[in-house]
């Protein structure tokens, strides 16, 4: 792959890398020289991302893993370490939006489904990654938050609570990890043109129309624009950035 090589020969783990933001980040890291471990619950989608990276001349492996399962996450991270000998960077991105439903009507199972992946899944991944990184006294982790880590909307209690939690979790992780030279940060995207957004709004066109009207920049983000911020946070260019949540929202939360 051509272009910059900020991640030359680095081993990078990306979860939820079968689609959307995660896929764009996996492709971006690989384009800049990384060997990418593509993790996704959808094994076929993970293989498609791996194949796309390899077609462009990059290096990747695909892993079918449910990031909300402790055993599956531990197994996947240990397989990456066995295969590549180390982990340099991780983007803990897998997440779901959950059904749009008011708290009064929200099923406990639906609340748990969102929290299990969006919060516990990031905790499980970061814990396993930090153990691997500690051995080498360095590394960089980026967690996925959202503008729903600072604002909200009706029907999004589970998602909002989960993304607020990620910002707090990232701060504690960052304080603990920096003792071993590991930087932990988060990225908080606004509306992004992904399958998740299309499903939430009913269609891609409906999502585009909503953000054209409501977001100061007048459009959704391309997944690659979020990936760029993730790569910056993960890179040595952000060497003094610790425990920060970078809002990348086209001005959405200014209003
Ligand atoms: N799209 C947006 O507007 C937006 C905005 C802010 C934050 N985010 C966050 O970005 C992340 C990615 O969102 P997206 O829009 O790219 O989503 P997406 O649904 O388009 O892609 C998510 C990927 O994660 C995978 N996945 C789902 N459950 C999983 C699990 N249990 N284990 C492993 N992989 C799993 C899916 O198979 C899919 O490939 C999420 O955490 C989301 O909350 C998205």
Image: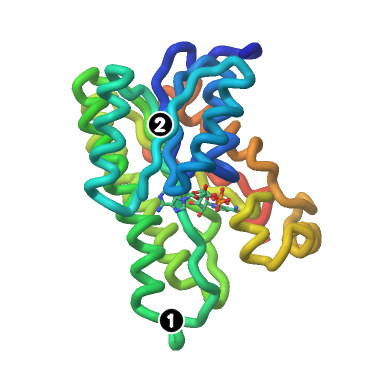
Q: Quarter of the image containing the N terminus?
A: top right
Number of marks present in the image shown: 2
The residue depicted at 53 percent of the width and 25 percent of the height is 29
Q: Where in the figure is residue 163, as x and y percent of width and height?
A: 44, 57
The residue depicted at 48 percent of the width and 31 percent of the height is 233
Vertical relation: 110 (above or below) 28: below
Q: Kindly state the secondary structure of the residue where label 1 is placed.
A: loop
Using the image, tell me which numbered label, if any, was put on residue 13.
2
Colour scheme in the image? Answer: rainbow
In this rendered view, identify the residue nearer to me: 88 or 214. 88
Q: Kindly state the secondary structure of the residue where label 2 is placed.
A: strand
Where, by quadrant of the figure, is residue 210 drawn?
Answer: bottom right
Vertical relation: 54 (above or below) 154: above
In this rendered view, identify the residue nearer to me: 193 or 64. 64
Q: Where in the figure is residue 207, as x and y percent of width and height?
A: 73, 61
In this rendered view, identify the residue nearer to me: 107 or 175. 107
């Amino acid at each position: 792959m051509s272009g910059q090589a900020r991640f030359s020969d680095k081993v990078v783990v990306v979860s939820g890398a079968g689609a959307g933001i995660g896929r764009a980040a996996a492709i971006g890291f690989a384009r800049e020289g990384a060997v990418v471990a593509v993790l996704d619950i959808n094994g076929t989608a993970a293989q498609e991302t791996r194949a796309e990276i390899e077609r462009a001349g990059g290096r990747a492996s695909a892993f079918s893993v449910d990031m909300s399962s402790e055993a599956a996450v531990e197994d996947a991270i240990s397989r990456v370490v066995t295969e590549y000998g180390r982990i340099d960077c991780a983007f803990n991105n897998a997440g779901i939006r959950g059904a749009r439903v008011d708290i009064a009507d929200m099923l406990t199972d639906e609340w748990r489904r969102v929290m299990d992946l969006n919060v516990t899944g990031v905790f499980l991944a970061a814990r396993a990654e930090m153990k691997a990184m500690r051995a080498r006294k360095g590394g960089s982790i980026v967690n996925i938050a959202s503008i729903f880590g600072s604002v909200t909307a009706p029907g999004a209690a589970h998602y909002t609570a989960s993304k607020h939690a990620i910002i707090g979790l990232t701060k504690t992780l960052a304080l603990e990890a920096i003792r071993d030279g590991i930087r932990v940060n988060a990225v908080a995207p606004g509306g992004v043109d992904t399958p998740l957004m299309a499903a939430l709004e009913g269609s891609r066109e409906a999502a585009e129309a909503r953000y054209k009207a409501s977001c100061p920049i007048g459009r959704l983000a391309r997944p690659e624009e979020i990936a760029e911020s993730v790569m910056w946070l993960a890179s040595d260019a952000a060497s003094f950035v610790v425990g920060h949540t970078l809002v990348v929202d086209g001005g959405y939360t200014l209003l």
